[in-house]
Amino acid sequence: MSHRLATGGRLIDRARDMKFTFNGKHMKGHAGDTLAASLLANGQTLLGRSFKYHRPRGIVASGAEEPNALVGLGKGDRYEPNQRVTTTEVFDGLSAETQNHWPSLDFDLLAVNSLVPQFLTAGFYYKTFLRPRAFWKHVYEPIIRKSAGLGKAPAHDARDPDRYEQLYAFCDVLVIGGGIAGLQAALSAAEAGARVALWEQTAHWGGRAPVDGVTIEGQDADTWIAATVARLEGMDNVHLRLRCMGAGLHDHGYVLGYERVSDHAPNIDAPRHRLWRMRAGQIVTATGAIERPLSFAGNDLPGVMLASAMRDYIVNYAVAPGQSVVVVTNNDDAYRTAIALRRAGVGVPAVVDARAEANGPLVAEARAAGITVLTGKGIRKVKGGRRVTGVEICRIDSKGTAFTEKFDCDAVAMSGGWSPVVHLWSHCGGKLVWDEAHHFFRPDASRPPLGADGAGFVTVCGSANGDMGAVLRGAHDAGLTAAKATGATGNAPAPATDAAPDMAPMDAVWMMPRNAEYELRMKMWLDFQNDVKVADVQLAAREGYQSVEHTKRYTTLGMATDQGKLSNINGLAILSDALGQPIPATGTTTFRPPYTPISIGAIAGEATGSTFQPLRRSPLQDWHEQNGADPEPVGHWRRPYTFLRAGEDRHKAVNREVTNARTNIGLLDASTLGKILVSGPDAGRFMDMLYTNMMSNLKPGKCRYGLMCNENGFLMDDGVVARLSEDAFLVHTTSGGADHVHGWMEDWLQCEWWDWKVHTVNLTEQYAQIAVVGPKARQLLERLGGMNVSADALKFMEWTDGKLGGFDARVFRISFSGELSFEIAVPASQGRAFWDKLLAEGADLGVMPYGTEALHILRAEKGFIMIGDETDGTVIPQDLNLNWAISKKKDDFLGKRGMEREAMIHPDRWKLVGLETLDGSVLPHGALAVTGGKNANKQAETEGRVTSTYYSATLKRGIAMALVRFGPDRVGEVLEFAGPNDARIKTRIVDPVLYDKEGAKQNV
């Protein structure tokens, strides 16, 4: 039984008790414990159930690689599932509950699955749930959904009360990993003069060195670690973070760090998690290595643990995982655990070593301590149910049909060698090479992740680089090289000398025994959480899955929450053996960020509640809210849908606004429209590529309507472009499209046309823009004075700068309503005053604000399109009869080749038309034109759909626009559109322009 030792524990404070509950049971730990250490100290070895077979599971590791011991932490709003007990620091009041069992942890009825493993082998779900077809919806899917997942989701009405934050930071050299290699690399880089940041994912510096008994300059590692940390803390050019995990490494030295700020102390006034967005000139990864398990029957039982993890619990926390421990290994490192166990007073019946000979210094020390060493042997089977009760030993090269020895024990320490943590190196394209001597993949220094200059920007040191002995010299070189690469000119003194015992070569043993029979292989676990066995991977190979990526998905090997940190190499080896090829030929799966899971809270940061999507405010927003505006969302804006007056509903208010704009003066707040300045010597060339029509020949002082398409030729935005000067254009976009269009511009300028001399600035919120619309619009502006806005001085599609009514103004003579119209831009700070001036001066002229719905009706009466209504991501300009806006003079523009594809030029495409119902009613939005026939799926065949539909106060009837098959050629035809309750609405196809087709109104 696991228990707390009477003495020892380098990381705990025995004077400070931490009380917590586990499945409602009150327990006690010490300050400095992890939850795993506290649970083991309380004799709790059963901590969960596996995903598929619901087999008993206990702690197998001591860090982020733990696959088994996942619990739900907290209560109520702070409940969080799937938290590793090995990385959770215990605190007073902690509440933990186990998961993935029913009805209880000790008595799980779903463990019945383990009685029929032959029906739940690799890929069983691909073979089982095919027939009968109707069962999927009514039987299979409901059962699978109920069984899926490990923890339970927080309550639907739970609201996270904690706060999270994100920080942006910069450094010359970022060192990830705070073991002795990382500390030395950071020290050397800092002494060379570089700005250094050092991250360590645990709560303590030094890594494994103190546990493994490493000596530095003849002293224990703790002494050197304390002195080095003190030196780093005293340097102004060094920034240290504990509990900060390097989550992902990306292009251009961009690294995400995940800092657990107050998980260990939830009552302090601090963010819970912090997401670091770091830009580093050079990156040094000193992320260490992870010990591999061994595959033998019963290697998943509670009490079977990695040898290094068992050593961690003894040395760091004074916790012994059992009273009697058998150690099984294929390398010398596990002997450290046997020695540590014996020193702690724990029985070690034997060390079972798969190698034919074992003669290293650590082996000799173990023998001198009286520990029995069995060579050329392996574990045939671990005996027990919910915990280990003993082991059977057999010859390593046998089939395991019989045992040669057996031992009673309550724990097993296993060591199958080590795997460097190469995840961060691989995230950004770093390549790996197979190290035959140590049987692991290590970073290939000749093929590092490359920066924009073609040079490597990531260096690896310590055991992460495959250096399994002394590491300080290599770490010093890595830190100094990284610093020099960022321009540092100083020198760092030579590093201290670390001593490590000589290690005899390991033996590549991927399962015990090597020729195990099928019955044993069916109980050898590779992926402990997902219940993937040696036999499953071998079955996948027999069924033709030769790619490791295919095998991963077929068996779910490495797809659990630990992402294969313990299982991948063993699985690759088993697959390679089954395929009859070396491991490098099989390769590895893809390493993707984050290295370990990060919280959604950290990803969101401060963007929660009202700040999740901050609302953008027009300079006139206060006036709107005070004067009856009925808001509607438009992108991140809230624009007035209409301005309600006493006794009005929306319909009456909109009709009033439309009528007034056609007869008097309407004012529209157009401030939300995108305004992007494009300038530079190549601005004209750039504009020609962005728009379907020619922009480079536009004269200063003139405006032109333009269409913008994506690469596929589909229309994505439109608006008026004004040429400000020979090398500057002002691009107007839709309200919801400004940020997207600006990002689109920058994407092309930075990634494709990086050598073009063009600069873009989003000026949307710098200006208030007001449309003055209606037959009396010019009369109002002339009253303001200061600018000649006569028909001769300011023609249609022209603009001018000047003073208007004492305001700095840029006046555009453009119209989206079909009426005489001016759009006037003034500095945002002057917007409200200018708006008030217009209302005051135009009171006797019938001036009246109108909202977005009136805007839509006015434009629909004129047949003008609206992005998002007439377009849906599949519409090209030709569908909207906008061929005239596509230049035939230009060799290329974005979308040109896309709209020349066969499907885009097919005559069968639906095209834009106007509609009027025979009874004058308003068509439902999105209504489909039905032919009366049925397709192969027994659905009604359609030949068109409504894109915009309104009641026109001007025409006194319903109007609509639609995309219809062969639409323009069918003007006058009557179609049937589907209405509510399967009604059919007879509708005539008409010209889209329903008001003032000659355009006389806008040219008054």
Image (cartoon, rainbow, N blue to C red):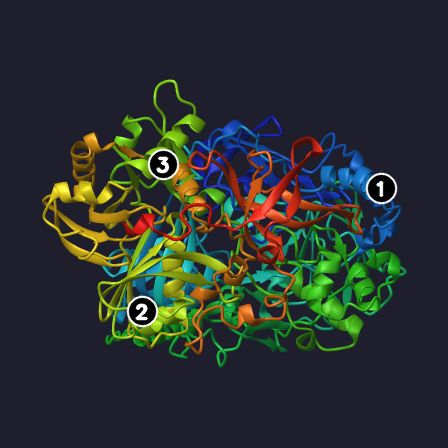
Q: What kind of element bears circle 2? A: helix
Q: Earlier in the sequence, mark 2 or mark 1?
A: 1
Asked if the residue under mark 1 is in contact with the one under mark 2, i.e. CB atoms within 8 Å, the reply is no
Quadrant in the picture for residue 623: top left
- Residue 189 image label: 2
- For badge 3, the amino acid type reads Gly
Q: Is residue 867 above or below residue 15?
A: below
> x, y (%) of residue 835?
21, 38
Q: How many marks?
A: 3
Instruction: Count neighbours of disc 1 (C-alpha within 10 A) and say few if under 14, some if 14 to 19, many if 20 or more.
Output: few
What x and y, as percent, mark residue 607?
40, 41
Q: Which residue does the numbered mark 3 point to in the structure image?
A: 851
| Residue kind at label 2, given as amino acid type | Ala
Q: Nearer the viewer, residue 508 or 752?
A: 752
In three-dimensional space, the C-alpha distance between marks 2 and 1, rounded to whole angstroms, equals: 63 Å
Among all residues in the image, which is located at the extreme top? 647
Judged by depth in the image, the label closer to the viewer, 3 or 1, is 3
Mark 1 is on which residue type? Answer: Phe
Element assignment for label 1: helix
- Can residue 410 be spotted in the picture? no
Q: Is residue 85 left or right of residue 485?
A: right
Q: CA distance from mark 3 to mark 1?
A: 52 Å
